[in-house]
C-alpha cells in the first residue's frame, strides 16, 4: 500500500516543467516567491527533447527551431549562455506534386502560373483578414462568427480556384498544426498567423520560424532553467487533483501534496481537462478543454555518415503532396557531421503510421527519403522517430488547434484564471502561439498575473 504523501507548502505550485512551467517558476522565484514545480515525467522539457546520436552530438525529437521576432525565446537562449546556428538552407529545394519531383531555388516552388496566382491571392486575402483579428481575443473580430463557422478546407474550396493551390493550403495546415484543413477553424488559422506576425513567418526557413537552431539542442534551455530552480522541481510527480478555494490550492500529485496560495497549470488544455478539480471548473472552461484537440505528428530522422545531398546541390528541404513524409529538412549538427535528414509525418499520415510496427514505419519514411534524394538515402546508419500522440503526458503535437465554433463560444475561458488557478502553456500565448517562444511568453505572463495577486 502506498504511504502517506509528502506534504509541502509554497506560495505557488506550478504544474508541468515544460518551457512554460519552468519560465513561470523562474520568474516567480526571482520575484521572491516560494515555488514548487511538479512534473509528471522523469525529465524536464515536455515537448522539447534532445536525442543523443553519439560523438557528443544530438538531434531534437521535439521542438527545435527559433526565428526572428521570437524575442523572448532568443533573449532567454542568450541569457542562459546558449548559442544558435542557422538551419542549413543552401541549395535547391525539391517539390513533389502528384508524383512529379522538381527542384527550385528560393521560397516558392515552380508551379503553374494559375496555381501561383491563386495561392498568392489566397495568401493576400488571408493576410488582410488576419489584420482584424486580435490573437488575445479572436472572438471579438467583426467577422469572427462567420470565420469561426468555417474550416480552412471549406474556405479554400470556396475561394481557391486551382487544385494545386488547395493542395498547398493542405500542406501548410499539416505543417503548422499537424492537422487537416477540414479540422481547423478559419478564425483559428487567422489568429495563429497574426500571433506569428504573418503566414510567411510561420512557414519560412530564412527569415521565418525555421531559421535557427540551438547549439547542443533546444532541451538545453529547459535543462538550464531546471538547474537554476534546483530542488524546487520535483520529477516523476504527475498531478492528479487540484482542490481550490478562497484560501488557496491543494495540489495532489503521486506521492506528494502541495498547499499553496496559487497554482500555474502549465500543460496543454487537453491535458488540463484530464485533471480532477474540486470544486469542478466552470462549465465554459471545462467544455473548452473538451474542444482543444492536439495535432498528430511523428518526427523522424535518418542519420548518414555525411549530408550527401549537399554535394548534389540540394538543401535537404522537400515539400511533397504524396507523402507519407510531406516535409523534410537537413537536420545535421552545426558542423554537418553526421548527415541527418528530418521528415515529419503529420495528421492522417502520423495516425496511419503510428499504428504499424516501428520497422514498417522506418521503411516507409526511409523509402520517402530515397525517393527524394536517391539510393544513397536508402541505407541510413541509424534512424530515430518519436510519436508524440502516444505520449501519456503530451497526447499529440505540435500542440492544440481550435476546431470551428470554439473561439467564439468558449474563447475567453482559454486564458482567464479561475480563482487561484492560472493557465499557461504555448496554447495560451498571444504572440507565437504554439511555439517555444509562445510557451516562454505564457510562463512569464502567468507569473506576472500571479505576482499581481499574491
Ligand atoms: C515534434 C515537435 C516539433 C516542434 N517543433 C517546434 C519548433 O521547431 N519550434 C517551436 O518553437 N516549437 C516547436 N514545437 C512546439 C513546442 O515544442 C511547444 O510549443 C512547447 O515546447 C510547449 O511548451 P509548454 O511548456 O507549453 O508545454 P509542454 O512542453 O507540453 O510542457 C508540459 C509539461 O507538463 C508535464 N505534464 C503533463 N501532464 C502533467 C501532470 N498531470 N502533472 C505534472 N506534469 C504534467 C509534461 O510532462 C511536460 O513536461 C514542436 C513540438 C513538437 C512535439
Image (tube, helix red, strand yellow):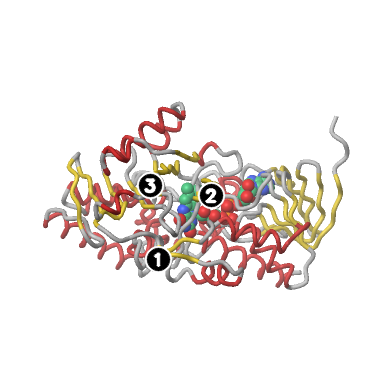
In terms of secondary structure, where does tag 3 sit?
A: strand
Is ligand 1 less than 8 Å from the beta carbon at label 3?
no
Judged by depth in the image, the label closer to the viewer, 1 or 3, is 3
In terms of secondary structure, where does tag 1 sit?
A: helix
User: Dot 3, how many residues are within 10 Å of its Cα: few (below 14), some (14-19), or many (20+)?
Assistant: many
Q: Which mark is residue 341?
A: 3
User: Dot 1, how many residues are within 10 Å of its Cα: few (below 14), some (14-19), or many (20+)?
Assistant: many
Q: Of 113 and 144, which appears nearest the observer?
A: 113
Q: Residue 109, position in %: x, y? A: 21, 55
User: Dot 2, how many residues are within 10 Å of its Cα: few (below 14), some (14-19), or many (20+)?
Assistant: few
Residue shown at the point (32%, 48%) measured from the top left: 308
Left or right of residue 399, residue 168 in this image: left
User: Label 2 near label 1: C-beta < 8 Å?
Assistant: no
Residue shown at the point (38%, 56%) measured from the top left: 189
Judged by depth in the image, the label closer to the viewer, 1 or 2, is 2
Q: Give the CA separation, mark 2 to mark 3.
A: 18 Å
Picture quadrant of residue 105: bottom left
Q: Of 177 and 236, which appears nearest the observer?
A: 236
Say whether residue 268 is visible: no
In terms of secondary structure, where does tag 2 sit?
A: loop
Q: Which mark is residue 194?
A: 1
Left or right of residue 308, residue 272 in this image: right
Q: Give the CA separation, mark 1 to mark 3.
A: 30 Å
Specify the quadrant that holds the C terminus: bottom right
Residue that label 2 marks: 55
Q: Residue 304, position in %: x, y? A: 39, 44
Left or right of residue 220, residue 309 in this image: left
- Pick out the residue farthest to the left: 113
Label 2 or label 3, whichever comes before in sequence order: 2
Amino acid at each position: 500500500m502506498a504511504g502517506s504523501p509528502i506534504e509541502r507548502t509554497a506560495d505557488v505550485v506550478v504544474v508541468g516543467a515544460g518551457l512554460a512551467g519552468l519560465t513561470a517558476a523562474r520568474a516567480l522565484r526571482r520575484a521572491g516567491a516560494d515555488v514548487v514545480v511538479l512534473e509528471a515525467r522523469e525529465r524536464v522539457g515536455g515537448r522539447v527533447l534532445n536525442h543523443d546520436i553519439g560523438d557528443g552530438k544530438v538531434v531534437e525529437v521535439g521542438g527545435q527551431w527559433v526565428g526572428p521576432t521570437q524575442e523572448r525565446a532568443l533573449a532567454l537562449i542568450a541569457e542562459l549562455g546558449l548559442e544558435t546556428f542557422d538551419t542549413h538552407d543552401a541549395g535547391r529545394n525539391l517539390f513533389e506534386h502528384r508524383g512529379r519531383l522538381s527542384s527550385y531555388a528560393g521560397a516558392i516552388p515552380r508551379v503553374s502560373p494559375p496555381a501561383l496566382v491563386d495561392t498568392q491571392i489566397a495568401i493576400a486575402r488571408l493576410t488582410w483578414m488576419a489584420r482584424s483579428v486580435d490573437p488575445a481575443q479572436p472572438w471579438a473580430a467583426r467577422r469572427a462568427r462567420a470565420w469561426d463557422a468555417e474550416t480552412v478546407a471549406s474556405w479554400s474550396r470556396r475561394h481557391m480556384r486551382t487544385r494545386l493551390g488547395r493542395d498547398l493550403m493542405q500542406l501548410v495546415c499539416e505543417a503548422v498544426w499537424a492537422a487537416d484543413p477540414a479540422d481547423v477553424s478559419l478564425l483559428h488559422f487567422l489568429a495563429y498567423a497574426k500571433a506569428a506576425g504573418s503566414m510567411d513567418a510561420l512557414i519560412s526557413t530564412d527569415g521565418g520560424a525555421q531559421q535557427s537552431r540551438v547549439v547542443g539542442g533546444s532541451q538545453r534551455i529547459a535543462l538550464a532553467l531546471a538547474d537554476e530552480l534546483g530542488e524546487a522541481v520535483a520529477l516523476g510527480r504527475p498531478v492528479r487533483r487540484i482542490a481550490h478555494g478562497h484560501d488557496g490550492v491543494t495540489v495532489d500529485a503521486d506521492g506528494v501534496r502541495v498547499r499553496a496560495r496559487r497554482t500555474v497549470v502549465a500543460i496543454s488544455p487537453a491535458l488540463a481537462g484530464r485533471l480532477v478539480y474540486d470544486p469542478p471548473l466552470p462549465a465554459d472552461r471545462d467544455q473548452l478543454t473538451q474542444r482543444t484537440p492536439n495535432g498528430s505528428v511523428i518526427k523522424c530522422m535518418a542519420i548518414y555518415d555525411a549530408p550527401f545531398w549537399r554535394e548534389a546541390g540540394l538543401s535537404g528541404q522537400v515539400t511533397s503532396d504524396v507523402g507519407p513524409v510531406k516535409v523534410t529538412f537537413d537536420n545535421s549538427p552545426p558542423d554537418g557531421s553526421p548527415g541527418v535528414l528530418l521528415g515529419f509525418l503529420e495528421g492522417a499520415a502520423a495516425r496511419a503510421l503510428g499504428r504499424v510496427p516501428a520497422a514498417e514505419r522506418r521503411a516507409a519514411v526511409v523509402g520517402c527519403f530515397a525517393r527524394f534524394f536517391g539510393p544513397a538515402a536508402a541505407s541510413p546508419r541509424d534512424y530515430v522517430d518519436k510519436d508524440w500522440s502516444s505520449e501519456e503526458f503530451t497526447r499529440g503535437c505540435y500542440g492544440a488547434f481550435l476546431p470551428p465554433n470554439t473561439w467564439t463560444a468558449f474563447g475567453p475561458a482559454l486564458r482567464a484564471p479561475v480563482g487561484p488557478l492560472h493557465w499557461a502553456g504555448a496554447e495560451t500565448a498571444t504572440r507565437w502561439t504554439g511555439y517555444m517562444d509562445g510557451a516562454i511568453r505564457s510562463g512569464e505572463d502567468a507569473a506576472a498575473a500571479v505576482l499581481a495577486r499574491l
